[in-house]
């Protein structure tokens, strides 16, 4: 599993809210055409999300959340060789957020598809997007 770490100039709560809102994924994930929430938990967070990068690269991921540890994990449905599994861990550092993003790609992904799953690129895209948004977009709320 490859991983990358960066400091984001936003609070962990702001980053958590952005990271756990599946409807925002197509805005910051490079190459993602569509993310459709399939299942939502009682806490309002997406439990399963379908992804469409291209007509040949579609899959769904199942999400688990640990709000106390500020950690999100995702994995494919059983038997999906072209999907990814990974995690994002947030940590408060000097008024900002240290985010570690880990990703393991499925065996059946092409080289072009694998280029979309570079943890450093995805983390940089998330950081740029979150830092470019007004703080009011991520009004603090209690974490779920």
Image: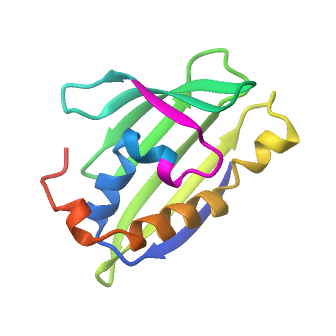
Please report the residue visible at 29 percent of the width from the left and 25 percent of the height from the top.
40
Please report the residue visible at 64 percent of the width from the left and 56 percent of the height from the top.
119
Left or right: where 109 falls relative to 71: right
Vertical comparison of 74 with 15: above or below? above
Extreme residue toward the right, this view: 111
Residue 79 placement (x, y as % from top left): 67, 15
Q: How many marks?
A: 0
In the rendered view, how is the structure colored?
Answer: rainbow
Vertical comparison of 109 with 90: above or below? above
Q: Which residues are magenta?
A: 27-37
Residue 120 placement (x, y as % from top left): 65, 63
Who is closer to the viewer here, 42 or 112?
112
- Residue 46 among magenta residues: no
Residue 29 placement (x, y as % from top left): 56, 50
Vertical comparison of 133 with 122: above or below? below
Extreme residue toward the top, this view: 79
- Residue 30 among magenta residues: yes
Left or right: where 3 falls relative to 41: right
- Quadrant, the C terminus: top left
Q: Quadrant of residue 114?
A: top right
Vertical comparison of 84 with 138: above or below? above
Residue 14 placement (x, y as % from top left): 28, 63
Please report the residue visible at 48 percent of the width from the left and 51 percent of the height from the top.
27
Extreme residue toward the left, this view: 142
Please report the residue visible at 42 percent of the width from the left and 32 percent of the height from the top.
63
Extreme residue toward the bottom, this view: 94
Left or right: where 110 falls relative to 94: right
């Amino acid at each position: 599993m490859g991983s990358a770490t960066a400091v984001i100039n936003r609070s962990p709560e702001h980053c958590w809210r952005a990271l756990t809102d599946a409807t925002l994924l197509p805005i910051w994930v490079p190459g993602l055409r569509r993310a459709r929430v399939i299942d939502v938990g009682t806490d309002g967070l997406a439990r399963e999300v379908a992804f469409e990068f291209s007509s040949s690269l579609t899959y769904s991921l199942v999400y688990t959340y640990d709000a106390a540890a500020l950690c999100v994990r995702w994995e494919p449905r059983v038997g999906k060789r072209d999907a990814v599994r990974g995690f994002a861990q947030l940590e408060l550092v000097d008024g900002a957020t240290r985010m570690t993003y880990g990703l393991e790609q499925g065996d059946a992904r092409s080289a072009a598809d694998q280029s979309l799953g570079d943890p450093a690129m995805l983390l940089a895209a998330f950081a740029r997007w979150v830092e470019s948004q007004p703080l009011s977009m991520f009004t603090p709320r209690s974490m779920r």
